[in-house]
Structure formats: structure tokens, C-alpha cells
Amino acid sequence: MKDINWFKNEVAPYLTDYEIQYRFYSNGDFGPLTQIRFESLKKGGTIEFWGLNWLGIFLYDHDKDDLVLNVLLEPHETEKKELYLGMLQELLLDNP
């Protein structure tokens, strides 16, 4: 399962042109929230891991002025979570 440690180990080291922030909120909409914010001149977005196993992914392309990803996945959507996190990784690493 991909989680914040996956991001820190598999994605963040390659995002050299990004500013990355890790935030924690004890009272999110779906339990405690761990949020990853990433921003570059070309792209920006967030990944939100909630304590009740919800997942939010948002990615915006500044160059194209286009919303690339905006999903909120429920706890039981395990396969979709893996798919969308993999898609996000590909989008960030293939064309930062």
C-alpha cells in the first residue's frame, strides 16, 4: 500500500524542482489528516491521507492552466488508490 513513506522514499527524492511540505491535522473531515503539498513553477498539488483511510489527490498544471487530477477515494477503493497514486507519480516524474 502506498502511503506517506512511499512518497518520501519513491517520489520526493526525484522532485528536485519542487517545494514539498508535510502537514498533519488532528481533526480532518475523515479523521486525522496527513497532507503532502508539492509545488513547482510547472505543477502543484496535494496528497491527503486520512486516518479513516480516505485518500485525496489533487494535481494542477500551471503551464497549461489545467486541472490534471482531482479525486477523493473511499476506504474500500484500494485498487483505485494504487492506480491514481501510480498515475500521479508518473505525471510528476515524467514531466516535472
Image: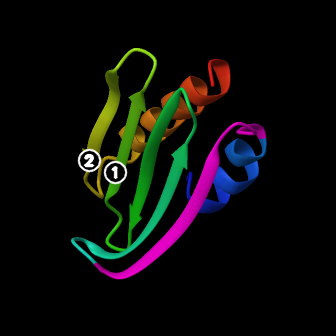
Magenta stretch prevailing secondary structure: strand
Task: Provide residue 35's location: percent of width, then percent of height.
Answer: 45, 63
Q: Amino acid at mark 2?
A: Leu
Q: Residue furthest top?
A: 64
State the extent of the magenta-drawn residues as a range. 14-27
Disc 1 target residue: 56
Task: Provide residue 57's location: percent of width, then percent of height.
Answer: 38, 44
Task: Work out how far the residue at label 2 is from the one at label 1, CA to CA, in angstroms.
Answer: 4 Å
Which residue is more in the foreground, 47 or 30? 47
| Residue contact at pointers 2 and 1, CB within 8 angstroms | yes
Q: Callout 2 environment at 10 Å: few (<14), some (14 to 19), or many (20+)?
A: some
* Earlier residue among tags 2 and 1: 1
Which residue is more in the foreground, 7 or 77? 7
Is residue 23 shown left or right of residue 18? left
Which residue is more in the foreground, 35 or 4? 35
Disc 2 target residue: 72
Identify which residue is drawn at 50% across, 54% down. 37
Q: Amino acid at mark 1?
A: Gly
> Residue 96 appears in which quarter of the rendering?
top right
Q: Residue furthest front?
A: 41
Q: Secondary structure at mark 1?
A: strand
Q: Callout 1 environment at 10 Å: few (<14), some (14 to 19), or many (20+)?
A: some
Q: Secondary structure at mark 2?
A: strand
63 part of magenta stretch: no
> Residue 61 appears in which quarter of the rendering?
top left
The mark found on residue 12 in the picture is none
